[in-house]
Image (tube, rainbow, N blue to C red):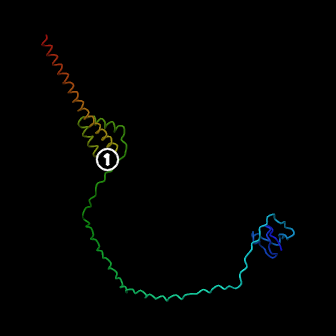
Amino acid sequence: MAFCVKCGAQIDDSTQFCAVCGSSQSDSEAQVTAQEVPVPVQATPAPTYAQPTPAQAAPAPTYVQPAPVQATPAPTYAQQTPVQAAPAPTYAQPAPAPQNLPVQQTPVKVYSNDPISVIGYIGTLILFAIPLIGFIMCIVWTASSKNRNRKNLSAAVLILTIIGIIIGIVVSIVAATFVSSILGSLYEAVDIYKLVY
């Protein structure tokens, strides 16, 4: 009788693995015999198994023959009629365009981004300074100039001119009201002076 190298459980001499701890009991390791193993202080009692009672045969299982399954009839499908392909659409070739008609082209506005020279700016500003002609040229260049720089300059001058005209009208009305009130009080003062002297 031999004992396990790891846990010290009693095993057969021919076993290679311990039934308790599962460690290997190979030949290379020295097997410990009963004399060499110290007895543990608290030994766990070996489990006891009840011996089977002699020949009480278990009742043989009884099987019930299942009822035969009625076969379901195979589904019948209506025979499909072949699908007839739709006739391919026919396309009529368009009539050729008459060759003699002129093709109308929409005019494309081509703007030039070339910068205006210093002389160009001076001439434009002098032209804008002329009272009626400058205002008309502002409107014309804002609407139809091909040079973006001149068009933007004309638009800016036109906007400033309109703002100036509106401010001039408002200031003129206020000044006329103020002057008329001063003149009215001056006339009254002169009348009073004439009466006194």
- The residue wearing badge 1 is 146
Identified at 31% across, 51% down, the residue is 109
Residue positioned most to the top = 197
Task: Say which element carries label 1.
Answer: loop
- Location of residue 95 with respect to 86 vertically, above or below: above
Q: Nearer the viewer, residue 162 or 92?
A: 162
- Left or right: where does residue 170 sit relative to residue 6? left
Residue 92 position (above or below residue 116): below
Instruction: Identify the residue shown where x is 65% and y is 84%.
Output: 58
Q: Is residue 97 above or below residue 156?
A: below
Q: Residue shown at 26%/42% (left/top)?
A: 139
- The quarter of the picture where the C terminus appears is top left
Q: Could you say which is closer to the camera, residue 149 or residue 34?
A: 34
Q: Residue at x 57, y 87 (%)?
A: 63
Placement of 188 over or under 139, stated as above or below: above
Of the pair 53 and 60, the residue shown nearer to us:
53
Residue 14, by quadrant, is bottom right
Return the x and y of residue 10 as percentages of the image width and height.
80, 71
Task: Estimate the x, y position of residue 33 in percent, counting from the top left.
Answer: 85, 71
How many C-alpha atoms fall within 10 Å of the one at disc 1: few (<14), some, or many (≥20)?
Answer: some
Dividing the picture into quadrants, the one containing residue 92 is bottom left
Counting from the top left corner in percent of width and height, residue 171 is at 24, 30
